Amino acid sequence: MKMILSEVEPGAILYCADLLNAEKCLITIIYQSDKSHWASALCERAFQEQRKFEIYRAYKDFRDDHVVDYLAYQPNSDIDQILAAYLQLKIMLGAFSELVYPKNLEYICSKLIGDIKLLPYSTPDIFSPEIKLIQSKALQRFKSIKVKAQ
């Protein structure tokens, strides 16, 4: 199985649409999560759950069997160490055999130990019109994101 790393909510959809359309993937969304004060915790939690639901549904537009996972990290924490430990643990558990990642994570991904295939993100300009159409449909589920026509 392939794991796709995404640093922004719809990143895997934007950059790996053809892959998502072709096969089952484990998608990990990496994001910063502030600790909320008790008074605003319920509203913040509700907002986060709604966003997760929208993201999950958007990926479901491609296939019914993708697994969406989230890796939240606190501000001022060392995301490099957290991500490296998370990925290494997933490799040891046999969660994936191919890792698709944004190029800025090349250093972390290249240091992983194990028999895995590393695939950096492809660029969006090589997508076919059909893939752009799939992207547009999936991204419509994100209320705060507008798709620009190119």
Image (cartoon, grey):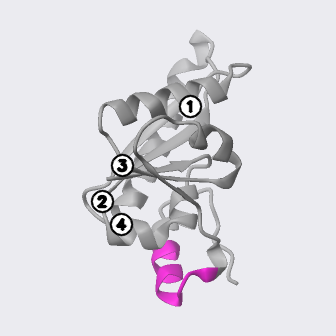
| Disc nearer the start of the sequence (1/3) | 1
Looking at numbered disc 2 in the image, what kind of residue is underneath it?
A: Lys
Lateral position of residue 44 relative to residue 92, left or right: right
Identify the mark nearer the N-term, 3 or 4: 4
Which quarter of the figure has residue 25?
Answer: bottom left
Which amino acid type is marked by label 3? Ser
Q: Are marks 4 and 2 in contact (CB under 8 Å)?
A: no
Does residue 90 appear left or right of residue 148 in this picture?
Answer: left
Mark 4 against mark 1, which lies toward the viewer? 1
Identify residue for label 4: 61
Q: Nearer the viewer, mark 1 or mark 3?
A: 3
Residues shaded magenta? 126-137
- The residue singled out by tag 1 in the image is 83
Could you say whether the residue bearing mark 2 is in a helix, strand or loop? loop
Residue lying at 36% horizontally and 49% vertically, measured from the top left: 97
Q: For label 2, count other residues whose C-alpha is less than 10 Å away and answer few (under 14), some (14-19) or many (20+).
A: some
Residue 146: % across, % down: 65, 67
Q: Label 1 crowding class (10 Å Cα cut-off): few <14, some 14-19, many 20+?
A: some
Is residue 96 shown above or below 15?
above
Q: Nearer the viewer, residue 24 or 51?
A: 24
Question: Does residue 114 sit above or below 121 in this rendering?
Answer: above
Mark 3 surroundings: few (<14), some (14-19) or many (≥20) residues within 10 A: some
* Mark 4 crowdedness (10 Å alpha carbons): few <14, some 14-19, many ≥20: some
Q: Can residue 32 be seen by looking at this rendering?
A: yes
Please, which residue is most extreme toward the bottom here? 129
- The three-letter amino acid code for the residue at tag 4 is Asp
Q: Which residue is mark 2?
A: 24
Q: What secondary structure is marked by label 1? A: helix
C-alpha gap between disc 4 and disc 1: 27 Å
Report how far apart the C-alphas of labels 1 and 2 lie in the structure.
22 Å
Q: Which mark is residue 97?
A: 3
Q: Tell which circle, 4 or 2, labels the residue nearer the N-terminal end.
A: 2
